[in-house]
């Protein structure tokens, strides 16, 4: 790992925490998606004559990103939900200036001794499937139940009226800007979504934006310790997150199991109980189609970043190949069911 | 005799997934190596498909 990055980080944190003896050690890169470079490290320092040894995470903007996301949004979401008692890492510092580490970044607590499931694994949660699934959908319900204004996130990007339209147009713009070849299934989906708007949202909530298997940490007993990757958080219909979490891409190959955990019906029941909201199948069908379209938008952007050499991380190639093909198939099937 | 391209890709991916990746420290190196191996398997399938397509035409 770059000594240069380690030294710059040490200088920054020593000043930020007012600890001139602070030492950064064991800096190493870990998987964390293509939208941020993610590193773990230890910071050792004394605070009021007490020796501290903290495991921390650095999330730095990459030279180019899968999609343009806002690290300030992510940091604020961690702050808000950490205060609320949800399992998220404690945020430590946010830096939007390029000078300390060449690109903007933030630092948060590392949740140690935990796992993240790869979407390629057929049964990552194994004997903890039930336990993980119940927690996963219960936490999603708590996010949906939170009042954005009360937790200080009422000014996040998004729309309080016609959020379905706002989100459709957002992802249509992404596809307009980043497609390298015609995307007929995405275009058909956009037409269908605009012609068949869903019922109004029951409630405007904080939408995590990428709530799925692979974006949370769980320990050896199957307890979820941290919900990660809040960079696409926005205001919107909580069914957006539910549909994304239940998308077949995240089912570990068994679409009857929500996120590779519990049965879909059970997941929805847990979500309803925790959120206090009602599951509306008509609205949900719309958000299911939207979820696959949003997926296409993300994967098309990833393919573009990789093709143009702005971000050679192989996760971009994988997204632009496997995930794009997967969601094109899902979306074609969903559209044919709804048009028939 | 030169090995077939799809055979090289398939067997190299198998080596990476089964032998190399487990030796790497868990984290970015192991995850990325596994992902690269998975894409080698996909590339082998694409190669076979292209080969079948060209032989069907020929």
Image (cartoon, coloured by chain):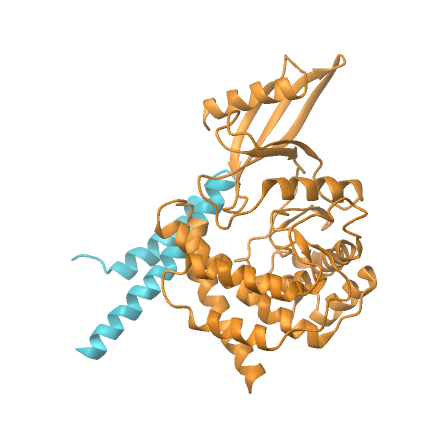
| Residue A116 coordinates in the image, percent (x, y) | 61, 48
| Depicted A87 relative to depicted A192: above or below | above
- Report if residue B56 is visible in the image: yes
Residues A88 and A76: in front is A76
The residue drawn where x is 44% and y is 66% is: A325
Rendering colour (chain A): orange
The residue drawn where x is 68% and y is 16% is: A18
Residues A1 and A231: in front is A231
| Residue A246 coordinates in the image, percent (x, y) | 64, 65
Indicate left or right for A292 with A220 as reference: left
| Residue A23 coordinates in the image, percent (x, y) | 59, 18
The residue drawn where x is 70% and y is 39% is: A89
Residues A334 and A204: in front is A204
| Residue at the far bottom in the pictured view | A340
| Depicted A11 relative to depicted A34: above or below | above
Name the image quarter holding residue A72: top right
Residues B54 and A332: in front is A332
Rendering colour (chain B): cyan
| Residue A231 coordinates in the image, percent (x, y) | 61, 47
Name the image quarter holding residue A105: top right
- Report if residue B22 is visible in the image: no
Quadrant of the rendering where the C terminus of chain A is positioned: bottom right
The residue drawn where x is 71% and y is 43% is: A88
Name the image quarter holding residue B45: bottom left
| Residue at the far front in the pictured view | A161
| Depicted A290 relative to depicted B37: above or below | below
The number of callouts visible is: 0
Indicate left or right for A323 with A88 as reference: left
């Amino acid at each position: 790992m770059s000594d240069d990055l380690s030294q710059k980080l040490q200088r920054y944190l020593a000043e930020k925490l007012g600890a001139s003896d602070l030492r950064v050690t064991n800096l190493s890169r870990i998987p964390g998606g293509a939208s941020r470079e993610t590193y773990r490290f230890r910071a050792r320092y004394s605070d009021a004559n007490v020796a501290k040894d903290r495991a921390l995470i650095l999330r730095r903007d990459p030279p180019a990103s899968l999609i343009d996301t806002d690290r300030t949004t992510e940091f604020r979401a961690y702050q808000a939900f950490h205060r609320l008692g949800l399992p998220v890492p404690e945020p430590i510092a946010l830096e939007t200036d390029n000078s300390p580490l060449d690109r903007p970044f933030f630092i948060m607590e590392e949740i140690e001794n935990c796992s993240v499931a790869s979407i390629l694994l057929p049964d990552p949660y194994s004997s903890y499937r039930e336990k993980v699934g119940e927690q996963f959908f219960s936490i999603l319900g708590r996010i949906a139940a939170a009042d954005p204004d009360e937790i200080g996130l009422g000014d996040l990007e998004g729309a309080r009226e016609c959020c379905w339209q706002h989100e459709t147009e957002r992802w249509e713009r992404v596809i307009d800007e980043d497609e390298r070849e015609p995307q007929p299934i995405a275009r058909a989906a956009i037409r269908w979504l605009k012609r068949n708007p869903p019922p109004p949202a029951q409630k405007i909530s904080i939408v995590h934006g990428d709530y799925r298997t692979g974006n949370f940490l769980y320990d050896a007993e199957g307890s979820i310790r941290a919900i990660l990757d809040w960079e696409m958080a926005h205001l919107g219909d909580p069914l957006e997150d539910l549909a994304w979490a239940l998308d077949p891409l995240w089912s570990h190959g068994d679409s009857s199991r929500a996120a590779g955990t519990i049965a879909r019906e059970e997941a929805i029941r847990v979500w309803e109980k925790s959120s206090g909201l009602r599951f509306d199948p008509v609205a949900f069908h719309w958000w299911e189609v939207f979820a696959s379209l949003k997926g296409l938008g993300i994967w098309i952007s990833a393919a573009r970043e990789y093709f143009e050499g702005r971000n050679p991380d192989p996760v971009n190639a994988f997204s632009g190949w496997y995930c794009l093909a997967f969601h094109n198939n899902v979306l074609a099937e969903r559209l044919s069911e709804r048009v028939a | 005799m030169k090995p077939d391209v799809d055979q090289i890709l398939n067997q190299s991916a198998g080596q990476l997934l089964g032998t190399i990746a487990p030796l790497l420290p868990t984290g970015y190196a192991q995850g990325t190596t596994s992902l690269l191996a998975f894409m080698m398997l996909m590339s082998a399938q694409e190669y076979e498909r292209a080969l079948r397509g060209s032989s069907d035409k020929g």
